[in-house]
Amino acid sequence: MHSERTKQLSQRQLWEELFQLRDKQREDMKSAVQVIRRAELPQELNRQGLMRWYLHPSLTDTILSTLMFYEQEIPPGSRSGKLKFQGGQVLYILKGRGHTRIDGVRHPWEAGDVVNLPLRRDGIIVQHVNDDEVETARLLATEPNLFSCTGVDRGSGFEQIEDSPEFRNQR
């Protein structure tokens, strides 16, 4: 006995659908954004803090979608939200000095440093702190965009444990 799914699949030509997908992707590339200008990106205040998104799984108008890439600002003496996620993210510190807590362990950083957030099966808990009481800290973060093939949870969970102070204060 065939299921409804089997019946539906038997009426499709999946090989031809690959060519249709190819053609759509080729057409989309003709108008895709090649250069993403910081000045054109709005700053978003979210549960993690202040961010500018260069590449995101929901942004489909860019020529590249294999990475997630954002800039985060942390006001003087403040901190990001606390997040549980799989890890596998790389941060480049553009400006400032502070530290990142990874599973409760403090890792200090300053401008010019690269912070590697480990990729762990059960995930990590991470929070960034600006140790400077005067200057804003700025960092760039990137990771592979695996969300469509592994899901946002990526087998380890994706949970906001604590909101950034700026987000809490806006409520």
Image (spheres, grey):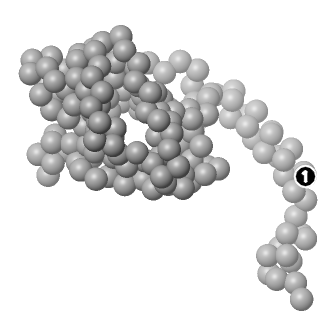
Q: Is residue 107 left or right of residue 152?
A: left
User: What residue did someone put label 1 on?
Assistant: 15
Q: Is residue 1 left or right of residue 53?
A: right
Q: From what the image shows, is residue 96 above or below residue 150? A: above
Badge 1 marks a residue whose secondary structure is: helix
> Which residue is at the front of the view, 4 or 71?
71
Q: Could you tell me how many numbered marks the image carries?
A: 1
Q: Quadrant of residue 74?
A: top left
Q: Is residue 65 left or right of residue 152?
A: right
Residue lying furthest top: 112
Q: From what the image shows, is residue 18 above or below residue 88? A: below
Q: From what the image shows, is residue 42 above or below residue 149? A: above
Crowd around label 1: few <14 · some 14–19 · many ≥20 (10 Å): few
Rendered-image quadrant of the N terminus: bottom right
Residue shown at 82% from the left, 83% from the top: 3
Residue shown at 84% from the left, 47% from the top: 18
Residue shown at 61% from the left, 34% from the top: 66
Residue shown at 12% from the left, 28% from the top: 77
**Is residue 48 visible to us here?**
no
Q: Is residue 151 left or right of residue 109?
A: right
Residue lying furthest bottom: 1
Q: Quadrant of residue 135?
A: top left
Percent x, y of residue 148: 61, 49
Percent x, y of residue 136: 19, 20
Percent x, y of residue 47: 27, 46
**Is residue 157 visible to us here?**
yes
Q: Which amino acid is tagged 1? A: Trp
Percent x, y of residue 117: 43, 33
